[in-house]
Image (cartoon, rainbow, N blue to C red):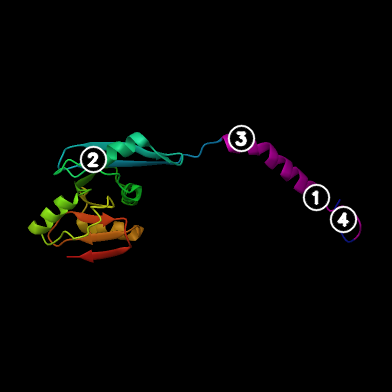
Amino acid sequence: MIKNATGSRPDTTRRAVLLGLGACLATPALARAKVPNTRRLALFNARTDERFDGVYYADGVYEPEAMTALDSIMRDHTADEATIMDVRLYDLFARLQGALDKTDPLRITSGYRTRATNDALRRRTRWAAKNSLHIEGMAADFTLPGTSARTLSRAARSLRMGGVGTYRGASFIHVDVGDVRSWTR
């Protein structure tokens, strides 16, 4: 028993006991309450006309069927080859759609690339990097209809989740989940 300087019990002890009892009674109800923990994503592959619009993460788990569908949409359409994409890229997409308050699908123009596809692209354009993170399944190029590349790149840079590239005269931007950096070419 706690006593104050005069030797009597302080009133706060009774209050503390009542508050503690209330917390104990409420704990089972709070433990049963589910806090929504889902992540949604809407993607459209502009090269293959494939779409994904749904939940890809729920209750601490990346949904396997959604991951398979997303990885297929992000495949190298030239080689018709897929890889397991870095899930941080999907998280970046979802956060970007949330930051822009957009539910329209991101239009993917390039996701995963095989080394051969990347090398062929490098021969045709100066924009493709020799050791591109596209090859690692960590990057994508995309647009969002009704949103300028400038707005997209600002929003992506503000997330600080990886690299953001813009290209003069292009309507798409590049994002990756490598080091935080940005560039314009």
Q: CA distance from mark 3 to mark 4?
A: 34 Å
Q: Are marks 1 and 2 in contact (CB under 8 Å)?
A: no
Label 1 vs 3, first from the N-terminus: 1
Q: Say few, some or many: other residues with alpha carbon within 10 Å of mark 1 (under 14 / 14 to 19 / 20 or more).
A: few
Res. 23 image quadrant: top right
Label 4 vs 2, first from the N-terminus: 4
Q: CA distance from mark 4 to mark 2?
A: 69 Å
Q: Residue at x 23, y 65 (%)?
A: 183
Within the magenta stretch, is there residue 147? no
- Across and down, in percent, residue 17 comes to 77, 45
Q: CA distance from mark 3 to mark 2?
A: 41 Å
Q: Nearer the viewer, residue 77 or 180?
A: 77
Res. 168 image quadrant: bottom left
- Give the residues in magenta: 6-32
Q: How many marks?
A: 4
Disc assigned to residue 13 = 1
Q: Amino acid at mark 4?
A: Lys
Q: Residue at x 8, y 57 (%)?
A: 124
- Across and down, in percent, residue 78 comes to 13, 44
Disc assigned to residue 57 = none
Provide the residue designation for mark 3: 29
Given this view, does label 3 or label 2 mark the residue nearer the observer? 2
Provide the residue designation for mark 4: 3
Whether residue 152 is visible: no
Q: CA distance from mark 1 to mark 3?
A: 25 Å
Q: Say few, some or many: other residues with alpha carbon within 10 Å of mark 3 (under 14 / 14 to 19 / 20 or more).
A: few
Residue 60 located left or right of residue 53: right
Provide the residue designation for mark 2: 73
Label 3 vs 4, first from the N-terminus: 4
